[in-house]
Image (cartoon, helix red, strand yellow):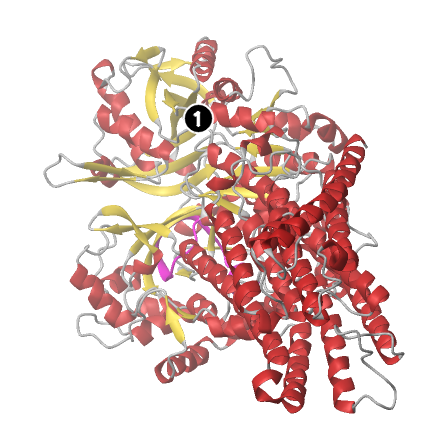
Amino acid sequence: MSGTSSGNGLLHLNDVEAGLSKDNADLDHHLDPDAGTSDPFDIAHTKNAAPETLKRWRQAALVLNASRRFRYTLDLKKEEEKEQRKRMIRAHAQVIRAALLFKLAGENQIVSGAPVASPSACDDYKIGLEQLASMTRDHKLSALEQYGGVKGLSGLLRTNLEKGIDEDEADLLNRRNAFGSNTYPRKKGRSFWMFLWEAWQDLTLIILIIAAAVSLGLGIKTEGLKEGWYDGGSIFFAVFLVILVTATSDYRQSLQFQNLNEEKRNIQLEVVRGGRTVKVSIYDLVVGDVVPLKIGDQVPADGVLITGHSLAIDESSMTGESKIVHKNQNDPFLMSGCKVADGFGTMLVTGVGINTEWGLLMASISEDTGEETPLQVRLNGVATFIGIVGLSVAVSVLAILLARYFTGNTEDPGGATQFIKGRTKFDDAFNDVVKIFTIAVTIVVVAVPEGLPLAVRRLSACETMGSATTICSDKTGTLTLNEMTVVEAFVGKKKINPPADSSQLHLSVVSLLSEGVAQSTTGNVFVSKDGDDVEISGSPTEKAILSWAIELGMKFDAIRSESTILHVFPFNSEKKRGGVALRRSDAEVHIHWKGAAEILLAACSGYLDSNGCLQSMNEDKEFFEAAIDEMAANSLRCIALAFRLCEQEKVPGNEESFDDWVLPEDNLVLLAIVGIKDPCRPGVKDAVKICTDAGVKVRMVTGDNIQTAHAIALECGILSSAQDVTEPTIIEGRVFRALTEKEREQVARKIMVMGRSSPNDKLLLVQALRKGGDVVAVTGDGTNDAPALHEADIGLSMGIQGTEVAKESSDIIILDDNFASVVKVVRWGRSVYANIQKFIQFQLTVNVAALVINVVAAISSGDVPLNSVQLLWVNLIMDTLGALALATEPPTDNLMHRSPVGRREPLITNIMWRNLLIQALYQVTVLLVLNFRGMTILQLEDDGNREHAYKVKNSLIFNAFVMCQIFNEFNARKLEEINCFKGVTKNYLFMGIIGFTFILQIIIIEFLGKFTSTVRLDWQLWLLASCNCGKADSGSQDTGCLVLHKAISTMQKIQGCMNLLFLLFLAI
């Protein structure tokens, strides 16, 4: 979803809620060069593409097996069904739950990530499952009040609202037995038999099975069971082998993605247990748990609000209405699956798993509806083109062979005319026609590359990342370690050294600092009973400040109990600060602010010195500005702490008025400025250099001070020390925001560092870069990064610090939050694209060679040298084994020395055309020479057994053709390098597939001749086949050597011509 921007450049929250607005739809249309294109397969942006565009290319594709071809593309029908099911569940949740439980009890067709305990009554709790579910589902505030509010409900559930439940396994088990576990039933993954069923639904394979059945029946009828079953049976076996290998490959991949999806669903979240904030799996959540919520979190279960400050929930995922709902004591019910849009709070879990609407929804739908990828669409276009050509060739071959057959121009291997009008029996003629038809259908099987589009399964974002021209990266946690510590502190004009030495400060200053830190944090401090063990939770910045305050002497729990929080202004990425109003025990109201140092400094009219005396800011503001600049220049994040007193008459008189109360943020008193160190990640400078060498520009977009951003950019290598650091190379977000749209487009490409940026500034930068033609990758971890992550060509969210909203809006999740991992994605993205090109070159070469040899032979002699079974074996090598071998080539360093692939760069490059044409021409030449001159070259013309000699020649052609493809796989490994064997021994899968193919070819020739209509070849013929030539298996050893010498001589002449052609192409 892309947020729209107002005239002043600020991002309104409603824009985020509303999803893709009309303005943004127009923007996407403007950014999408595919709009109005005549080629349905020419789609540069499938991300956020209109359903009509996606339907158009599906309808234009030539498809033999739709269920397999479109298995990994976005299922438009399922998407619509998902929305309909959501609406139905919202309307009939109780009935659906009962029906689902009944179905679970009667069937064993559904499994769960963890066992789903059947809810049962339990004497340990004074409230039942149905009472809780009914209250939460129907939002019965009266029922909650009847139980005594949240406090009374916690008593019924035996929960301490401050300390949570105990981490006692017996108690957790009791809760799961009484109220269920936080898992939902999920449909079993498809079995291997389902993939087998799907693989054989290919139209051409069905036709071949029918043809094989007819051939089998006729063969048994005419030749008897002992000899007559070979032709039909061999086709049956070849088709079965193709189906088996296809299903096995698809099934293995399905299992891998099931594991990935399980990892994605297993969200780690914080809960309060035994007074400590601990991380647990979402599956381990139980009724009675106390869960802290902050902006960007997903509500993990149904629950009731305990306390909340400006807590706003996006319920659109469940209600379908794009609006934010503010939660308070008048509307305390929280629904599982919704997102926290603003504020923070804590909730008491009242419903988990199947007892929530979210659980019902997840149990009744399939989460994976596929995805779309531009390369996938283009490959479908290539497959369709090849398929049309192949289909045309097959029809031509069929027509030619039938015409020659019925006009008496086709001879059998013995030289006799196959069809003589009025003499040939009907059964013989029908059997011959079935064989001709089978060959034509097999040509279609070989020609239509169903496996080609499947080579890019689930790799859309990775594939696009290979084309990225710029990366807009966060600073904190991505370029830096996100391990923060306070290393400098100014209280008044005094620099405290060491920064946590409270002996240098007056007691009143320490008291105010401790109060401000303890009450304005969303983190928590747990102190063990003996006081030795202190655990701090929260964001890295919060943890750093809390640690510093504890070292100053802050008693966290005691200070929080001494005052009451009246109202909270959560930290805001736009204003770069957050505030809290609290009433002390002496009735005074203090307002504490914490945020960006230079922004809070501008709001201060005074400061407390280290002795606790109030001083005027007028004369000393320059001192503090210089101190901030100095810390920022040392790569420190500068945070200021300030407060002010609030007059009693300005404090709202009732609780309802607090929501509308705007905390005063003027005339503040500065308490301290702290400098937080967050070191650069090891290796990030090398990673940035790799990107630069690869033609990918790295830009830093951060909310930190511009000087801090500059210093970190220098450390990371984004800026060089000699580089011009004036605008617009380094720019503040507010300056960029103030530019016109045209000016932003001109300036965007020059920006290397943007400091003090808001989420909307990042969005505007992404839009400007994309309009300029860049393929933009964006990293982000916060909820407010969601619009930019969604708008970018590739959104990368952080797996550790990233919120659930950010992860949902992104395309790739970086599990270790490391920029070096982003570079790995670029490498793998380029590798995906390169491997697909290798496979295309390999497959097109096979297609061209197979089609040409069969067409020319059909026209000239009325017969084809490669029969149906042999072509099916070639298809297996090409479509499945070839894809597996070439698509698994690991990335090489050479990939990062190229420029990014452009959006419109052709899939088949000039170099690929050169390689493809030369290799295909060589193969066709060799095979045609063997076909038309093979008898002479191999000295088989005088062989008394003409049928045997014919089989020898065709066996040699088949063997040579397969050997060509085996060696061609080596050629396809390196499209632009002469040494195609470089690094081949490191790819064990490639070597294994080559070895497996070669061994199977030996078995086919030497032991399965009856099935493939081949004869055994001796070692000289195998040697010749490997050199694309062969010899007869009859005659003496001396004759064999003579034939070998003559054949090699002939082939060397051919190869010399091919080398000359290669040099000409190379020169071109």
Q: Quadrant of residue 300?
A: bottom left
User: In terms of depth relative to the viewer, which is nearer, 177 or 142?
Assistant: 177
User: In terms of depth relative to the viewer, which is nearer, 812 or 703?
Assistant: 812
Q: Does the magenta-highlighted stretch encompass residue 319?
A: yes
Q: Is residue 41 visible?
A: no
Residue 764 in the figure: left or right of residue 287: right
Q: How many marks?
A: 1
Which residue does the numbered mark 1 point to in the structure image? 683
Q: Does the magenta-highlighted stretch encompass residue 976?
A: no
State whether residue 1042 is above or below residue 891.
Answer: below
User: In terms of depth relative to the viewer, which is nearer, 754 or 592?
Assistant: 754
Percent from the top left, x then y, of residue 887? 57, 49
State whether residue 667 is above or below residue 83.
Answer: above
Magenta range is 297-320
Residue 832 in the figure: left or right of residue 951: left
Q: Classify 10 Å Cα crowding around label 1: few (below 14), some (14-19), many (20 and above).
A: few
Q: Quadrant of residue 866?
A: bottom right
Percent from the top left, x then y, of residue 570? 44, 40
State whether residue 976 is above or below residue 605.
Answer: below
Q: Quadrant of residue 189?
A: bottom left
Percent from the top left, x then y, of residue 560? 26, 39
User: In terms of depth relative to the viewer, which is nearer, 460 or 736?
Assistant: 460
